[in-house]
Image (cartoon, rainbow, N blue to C red):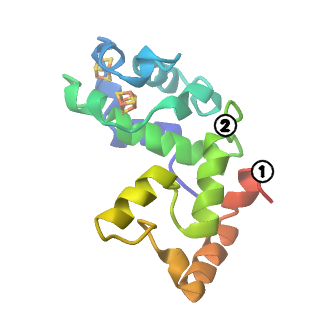
Amino acid sequence: MGKSVKEILIDGNGYACIQCGRCTGSCPSGRECSLRTRKLIHMARMGMDVIKTEELWDCTTCFTCQERCPKEVKTTDMIIELRNLAVEEGYFPTMSDVPKIIIKSLYDTGAGQPLSPEVSKIRAIIGLKKEAYDVSTNAETLKKFQRLLDGLEITKKGGLR
Ligand code: SF4
Ligand code: SF4
């Protein structure tokens, strides 16, 4: 069992937040979607259903907000932990297929980020293997990895099995 929202706030220095909004103002994802970092911290502190909000999944974990926070609030770390808690509690994002694609790729190949054909081509040109991460090149290791994911019920929670 992971941390509670309160424990995540304590460990992430979330109670030091002064709601200045610098995190939201510097968030590249927030310019393109409804993600508001300051609001997520506020929701967590107010005991609102922050783990149910789909905005939690719009963060690209670029760490800009965390680096720029004047109160050293670990915003990105907290978002990651809130996501962990959300999945643990069964709140998996539904707004896009991206998380499912990532989990499927992770399960099938060991790599969460499938490489595009273009990148694979460039890798081949410069003498690298086609796939960046190669759990999949060892069938036994991949099987062990898949058993681990099954044990954690990641695919089940992601609606893939
Ligand atoms: S930048 Fe830091 S202090 Fe300001 S709102 Fe964001 S988390 Fe709070
Ligand atoms: S880590 Fe997430 S919330 Fe913070 S600036 Fe980057 S995308 Fe925005």
Q: Which residue was labeled with disc 1?
A: 159
Residue 154 image point, x, y percent: 66, 59
- SS of the residue under disc 2: loop
**Alpha carbons under labels 1 and 2: distance apart:** 10 Å
Q: Quadrant of residue 76?
A: top left
- Viewer-proximal residue among 109 and 39: 109
Which residue is pictured at 55% across the width and 34% down the height? Answer: 57
Which residue is pictured at 66% across the width and 58% down the height? Answer: 104
Q: Is residue 22 above or below residue 55?
A: above
Residue 45 image point, x, y percent: 47, 24
Mark 1 is on which residue type?
A: Gly
Mark 2 is on which residue type?
A: Pro
Q: Which residue was labeled with disc 2?
A: 93
Residue 137 image point, x, y percent: 52, 80
Relative to residue 66, is residue 57 drawn left or right? right
Query: Residue 66 shows which numbered tag?
Result: none
* Labels 1 and 2: the sequence-earlier one: 2
Q: Quadrant of the N terminus?
A: bottom right
- SS of the residue under disc 1: loop
Mark 2 closeness class: few <14, some 14–19, many ≥20 residues within 10 Å: many
- Viewer-proximal residue among 10 and 43: 43
Give the quarter the ligand 2 occupies: top left
Residue 61 image point, x, y percent: 39, 39
